[in-house]
């Protein structure tokens, strides 16, 4: 095996985002829809009602025109139709029986019922794992590496399925998991000297604070050559990326929100889509759900359709993520169009008609590190998206600042947000270390309206 080759899969990855791959996608889409017509009652009915014949499907335009989006609301409605039985609902939407599933992963379920990911071993190893291998290879991960695996291992798709999938690279896995908390995570790293960190960016940030306290070492002395992060915004926010890379002394790679992973270009270019042969990607208008052309710089709601798979099958599925796509060649020279996560549709805030996402706010706050710690909370007194101005943001300032310095810093932050985001927030200061840290996903909101019920 040539460890210097540019791609994990030299047969398919050079073809990404080309006319040749488009022909392959249409062929695979017809086959997948045929399987669903024969074996998945929910989609069989949808295909019949829309008068779409998989064998005669003319192209992606007809597909988008006739097949409705499937999102969390559609899943909830289907579960209700099945009497609240989620397993019965899954049997309606898969080309195999629920009894043939080998593993069920989920989302974290922070906004309601966790979205299930029913997976066979084929799904884990040859689809999800294949994408993990492709992204990991581009991030410089090789068989001789030891991976300190810090995603939560309890049910979530970023956990066990990702860990199993990454082993396709031949790496040594150190499955400590976020549940172990920072003391054990750092102890395991001290003992076995992982060369790659895999986990959330917020945990990576937290370890910057904890490592000197627990190991008497900076994270830059722990021996990592790369960090592969996902599960939340962070690695793709330039200011957060700079903070983490400066502390660890190595590159951070962004992965997730689809089949993607960022490249090793010094400046963040978005995530390269690595699954053209495994899933069809499209953009739709977040409000009208009408298709949006895949043109350089276009923004829209990301929608996925599986071209391979057994249990984990998506048909125009949306997870509510807003992406911006880039179809021009990447400066890194690697294949695949790129996408940046702008935010989640259910996280979007409207302040006097201005739309703003938490990742944008976090980016501005992190511009002021080390005068601030980087920890912040957006305070919501009413259910979003509408926010009665001013938007309130609780921000941790750094140690040792005088009252005068803190006041001046607050004015700087407000001025910067006014220029960049067109909002004039109210900054509420918090003492350093007072905002709760998370070993899982970083907390973004402080929802006072829920406490006042």
Image (spheres, grey):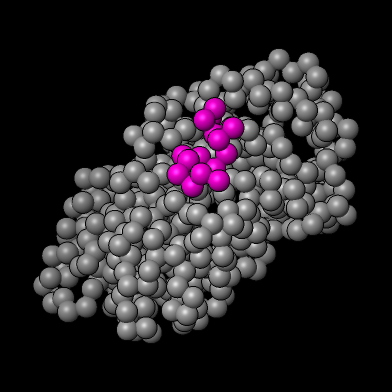
Q: Position of residue 433 (x, y in %)?
A: 33, 78
Question: Is 26 located above or below residue 364 in the figure?
Answer: above
The answer to whether residue 324 is visible is yes
Q: Most extreme residue toward the left, as rendered?
A: 404
In the image, what residue occupies the spot 74% across and 18% down? 57
Residue 321, position as x, y percentages in the image: 52, 44
Horizontal placement of 356 versus 133: left or right? left
Residue 134 appears left or right of 84: left
Could you tell me which residue is drawn at 71 percent across and 37 percent down?
A: 308
Observer-nearest of 410 and 2: 2
Query: Measured from the top left, where is residue 274 in percent x and y?
Result: 54, 39
Front in this rendered view, residue 319 or 439: 439
**Does the segment drawn in magenta span residue 41?**
no
The image quadrant of residue 19 is: top right
Majority secondary structure of magenta residues: loop
Q: Is residue 385 visible?
A: no
Does 9 lie within the magenta span? yes
Residue nearer the viewer, 291 or 138: 138
Reply above or below: 215 against 226.
below
Q: Nearer the viewer, residue 57 or 42?
A: 57
Question: Is 434 situated left or right of 368 in this image?
Answer: right
Q: Position of residue 311 (x, y in %)?
A: 77, 47
Q: With respect to residue 249, does 88 lie above or below? A: above
Region rendered in magenta: 1-16
Instruction: Place residue 409 in its image quadrant.
Output: bottom left
């Amino acid at each position: 095996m040539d460890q210097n080759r540019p791609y994990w899969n030299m047969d398919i990855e050079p073809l990404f985002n080309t006319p040749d791959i488009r022909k392959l996608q249409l062929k695979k889409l017809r086959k997948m829809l045929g399987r669903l017509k024969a074996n998945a009652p929910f989609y069989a009915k949808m295909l019949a009602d829309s008068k779409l014949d998989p064998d005669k499907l003319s192209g992606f335009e007809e597909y988008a025109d006739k097949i409705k989006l499937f999102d969390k609301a559609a899943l909830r409605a289907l579960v209700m139709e099945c009497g609240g039985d989620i397993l019965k609902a899954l049997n309606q939407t898969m080309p195999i029986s629920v009894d043939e599933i080998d593993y069920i992963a989920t989302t974290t379920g922070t906004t309601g019922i966790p979205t299930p990911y029913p997976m066979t071993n084929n799904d884990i190893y040859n689809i999800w794992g294949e994408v993990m291998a492709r992204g990991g290879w581009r991030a410089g991960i090789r068989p001789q590496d030891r991976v300190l695996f810090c995603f939560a291992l309890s049910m979530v798709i970023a956990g066990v399925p990702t860990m199993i999938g990454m082993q396709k690279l031949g790496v040594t896995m150190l499955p400590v998991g976020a549940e172990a908390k920072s003391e054990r995570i750092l102890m395991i790293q001290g003992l076995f000297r992982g060369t790659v960190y895999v986990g959330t960016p917020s945990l990576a940030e937290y370890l910057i604070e904890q490592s000197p306290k627990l190991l008497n070492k900076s994270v830059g002395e722990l021996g990592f050559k790369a960090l592969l992060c996902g599960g939340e915004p962070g690695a793709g926010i330039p200011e957060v990326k700079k903070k983490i890379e400066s502390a660890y002394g190595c590159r951070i790679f962004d992965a997730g929100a689809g089949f993607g992973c960022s490249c090793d270009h010094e400046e963040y270019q978005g995530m390269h889509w690595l699954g053209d042969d495994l899933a069809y990607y499209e953009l739709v208008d977040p409000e009208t759900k009408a298709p949006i052309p895949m043109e350089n710089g276009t923004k829209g709601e990301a929608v996925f359709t599986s071209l391979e798979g057994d249990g984990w099958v998506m048909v125009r599925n949306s997870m509510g993520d807003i992406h911006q796509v880039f179809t021009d060649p990447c400066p890194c020279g690697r294949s695949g169009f790129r996408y940046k996560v702008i935010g989640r549709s259910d996280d979007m805030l409207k302040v006097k008609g201005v739309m703003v996402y938490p990742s944008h706010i976090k980016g501005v706050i992190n511009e002021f590190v080390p005068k601030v710690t980087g920890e912040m909370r957006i305070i919501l007194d009413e259910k979003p998206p509408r926010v009665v101005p001013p938007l309130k943001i609780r921000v941790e300032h750094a140690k040792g600042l005088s009252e005068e310095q803190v006041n001046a810093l607050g004015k700087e932050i407000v001025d910067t947000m006014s220029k960049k985001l067109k909002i004039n927030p109210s900054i509420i200061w918090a003492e350093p270390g007072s905002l709760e840290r998370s070993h899982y996903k970083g907390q973004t909101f402080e929802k006072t309206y829920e406490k006042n019920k």
